[in-house]
């Protein structure tokens, strides 16, 4: 039996490269970062983990250009358990209409994972952002599969301690504030060169 015969068998599982059937990406809005990411941007139909122990260091400015572009396609942007309520005038100034944003405040970790999963899987959401996602690996796997099913951009903010755990996420970045801006360390990028980028946010 040839390799072609094996690969054409429907019983053989062949994972997608970036989660999305097309391997599609959304440009980050930062050329230096796009140059280091597989495909040149955030993987669509996939999960991205943003690891940091601090908030307010530029993590929203990092993702806002992509969110604005995606929301322009008419789908929702869902915020699950944000540490601070998004400020509507700031969203509008960044090109993201507040009327396209949904804020969800679940009470428990289980409810939080459920809300993120439903948003990603629905097909009605361009992106789902989630904080306090101290989820087990099995939960992260569920979220990755949900992002694939809904062709959504999943962005989950986790503590740096999660970096030691294995993860099925397509992309993992650690974020650190520095005097020069935001240091983005690419811990995992399927097919990308990786490395560090300093963005003067």
Image (cartoon, grey):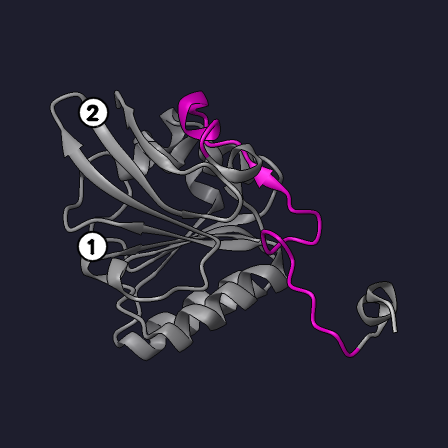
Rendered position, 28 above or below 143: above
Q: CA distance from mark 1 to mark 2?
A: 18 Å
Q: Position of residue 38 (x, y in %)?
A: 53, 39
**Horizontal side of residue 198 vs 17, given as left or right:** left
Instruction: Label 1: state its secondary structure.
Output: helix
The C terminus - image quarter: top left
Q: Is residue 166 magenta?
A: no
How many numbered circles does the render carry?
A: 2
Q: Position of residue 176 (x, y in %)?
A: 18, 38
Which of the pair 166/33 is nearer the observer?
166
Rendered position, 192 above or below 158: above
Q: Which of the 4 image quadrants contains residue 138? A: bottom left
Which of the pair 40/104 is nearer the observer?
40
**Horizontal side of residue 32 vs 134, given as left or right:** right
Q: Which of the 4 image quadrants contains residue 89? A: top left
Q: Which residue is mark 2?
A: 181
**Horizontal side of residue 191 vs 21, given as left or right:** left
Which of the pair 148/165 is nearer the observer?
165
Q: Which residue is mark 1?
A: 160
The mark nearer the N terminus, 1 or 2, is 1
Instruction: Label 2: state its secondary structure.
Output: strand
The N terminus - image quarter: bottom right
What is the magenta range? Answer: 11-36
Q: Is residue 28 magenta?
A: yes
Rendered position, 165 above or below 27: below
Q: Position of residue 60 (x, y in %)?
A: 31, 38
Secondary structure, magenta segment, majority class: loop
Look at 38% across and 72% down and name the residue there. Answer: 113
Look at 29% across and 43% down and name the residue there. Answer: 86
């Amino acid at each position: 039996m040839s390799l072609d015969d094996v690969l054409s068998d429907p019983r053989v599982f062949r994972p997608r490269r970036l989660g999305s059937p097309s391997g599609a990406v959304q440009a980050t809005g930062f050329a230096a970062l796009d140059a280091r990411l597989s495909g040149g941007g955030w993987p669509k139909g996939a999960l991205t983990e943003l690891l940091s122990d601090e908030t307010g260091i530029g993590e929203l400015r990092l993702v806002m250009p992509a969110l604005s572009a995606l929301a322009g396609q008419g789908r929702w942007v869902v915020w699950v358990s944000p540490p601070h309520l998004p400020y509507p005038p700031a969203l509008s100034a960044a090109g993201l209409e507040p009327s396209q944003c949904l804020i969800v405040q679940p009470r428990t970790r289980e409810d939080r994972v459920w809300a993120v999963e439903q948003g990603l899987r629905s097909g009605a959401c361009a992106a789902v952002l989630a904080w306090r996602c101290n989820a087990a690996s099995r939960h992260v796997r569920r979220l990755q599969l949900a992002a694939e099913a809904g062709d959504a951009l999943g962005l989950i903010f986790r503590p740096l301690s999660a970096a030691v755990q294995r993860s099925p996420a397509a992309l993992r970045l650690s974020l650190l504030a520095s005097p020069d801006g935001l240091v983005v360390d690419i811990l995992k990028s399927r097919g990308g060169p990786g490395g560090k980028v300093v963005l003067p946010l």
